Image (spheres, rainbow, N blue to C red):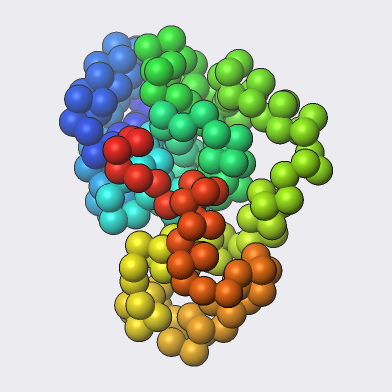
């Protein structure tokens, strides 16, 4: 039987070691590599081509949401399990919209990590009971969160541009990082402001923080 090959991506070495110990205790499973930031996770995914990527949301350079989105575009055969401390419905929705196959809280690693990896390796979705409850509650409360509804209308590219702008990058820096022209960045920026009803970069930063589009490192 073919070994299940897994790549771990988390900027905390302790989390990676704990996850590796749990995963390699499973028969025919192998952790083929580790990454300490999002950029490294993408590079190793391309090089190692694992069956499953377990990726933290709050990583330096590229966060887990953007890593997932790029994996879906370039390496769709890799299953992605998002690992995080965030119990926010908005974060769950962003992760799933980016293409994640599962969402696991770090507090549930010991109990659910092997079950989650097994499920997504078998082409199933995986959410723990706690996350299912959060998603269900959000569904029941639908229509009462106009700001989140606005965010839901943003494209993955627009969300990435908001994140980078909120981190202080200029239009020129965005152009270089995303491989698009400065004029295209400006067009995206104008459309984002129009969609969200915002009028300044300061308002955009506050919006990004309220909706967890950018994550404070202390919350990781």
Image quarter (top left, top right, bottom left or bottom right) of the C terminus: top left
Query: Measured from the top left, where is residue 57 in percent x and y?
Result: 40, 41
At horizontal 37% and vertical 12% (from top left) the residue drawn is 110
Does residue 55 lie above or below 109 as drawn? below
Q: Is residue 22 above or below residue 98?
A: above
Instruction: Name the residue furthest bottom.
Output: 183
Q: Residue at x 24, y 39 (%)?
A: 11
Question: In the image, is residue 129 above or below residue 89?
Answer: above
Residue in front for this viewpoint, 198 or 11? 198
Where residue 26 appears, as percent x and y from the top left, is 35, 13
Q: What is the quadrant of residue 113 in the picture?
A: top left
Could you say which is closer to the camera, residue 132 or residue 119? 132
Q: Tell me: residue 189, above or below residue 143.
A: below
Task: Please state if 93 lies on the left or on the right of 114 as rendered.
Answer: right
The answer to whether residue 47 is visible is no
219 relative to 82 in the view: left or right: left
**Front-most of residues 117 and 3:** 117
In depth, the one of 137 and 51 nearer the eye is 137
Image x and y of residue 192, in percent: 60, 71
Residue 174 shows up from this direction? yes
The quadrant of the picture occupied by the N terminus is: top left
Q: Give the residue drawn at x 43%, y 87%.
A: 182
For residue 37, side relative to residue 155 (left or right): left
The count of marks equals 0
Give the residue displayed 81% in from the left and 43% down from the top.
143
Q: Is residue 32 left or right of residue 143?
A: left
Residue 216 screen position, x and y as percent: 35, 45
């Amino acid at each position: 039987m073919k070994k299940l090959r897994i790549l771990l991506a988390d900027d905390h070495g302790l989390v990676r070691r704990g996850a590796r110990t749990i995963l390699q205790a499973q028969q025919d499973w192998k952790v083929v590599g580790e990454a300490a930031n999002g950029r490294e996770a993408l590079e190793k995914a391309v090089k190692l081509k694992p069956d499953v990527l377990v990726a933290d949301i709050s990583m330096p350079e590229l966060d887990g949401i953007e890593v997932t989105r790029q994996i879906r575009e370039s390496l769709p055969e890799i299953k992605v399990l998002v690992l995080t401390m965030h119990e926010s419905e908005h974060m769950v929705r962003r992760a799933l919209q980016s293409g994640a196959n599962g969402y696991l809280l770090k507090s549930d690693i010991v109990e659910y990590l092997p079950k989650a990896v097994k499920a997504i390796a078998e082409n199933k979705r995986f959410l723990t009971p706690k996350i299912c409850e959060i998603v269900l509650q959000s569904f029941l409360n639908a229509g009462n969160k106009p700001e989140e509804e606005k965010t839901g209308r943003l494209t993955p590219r627009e969300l990435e541009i908001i994140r980078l702008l909120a981190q202080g990058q200029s239009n020129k820096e965005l152009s270089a990082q995303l491989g698009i022209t400065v004029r295209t960045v400006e067009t995206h920026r104008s459309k984002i402001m129009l969609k969200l009803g915002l009028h300044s970069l300061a308002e955009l930063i506050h919006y990004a923080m309220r909706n967890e589009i950018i994550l404070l490192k202390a919350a990781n």
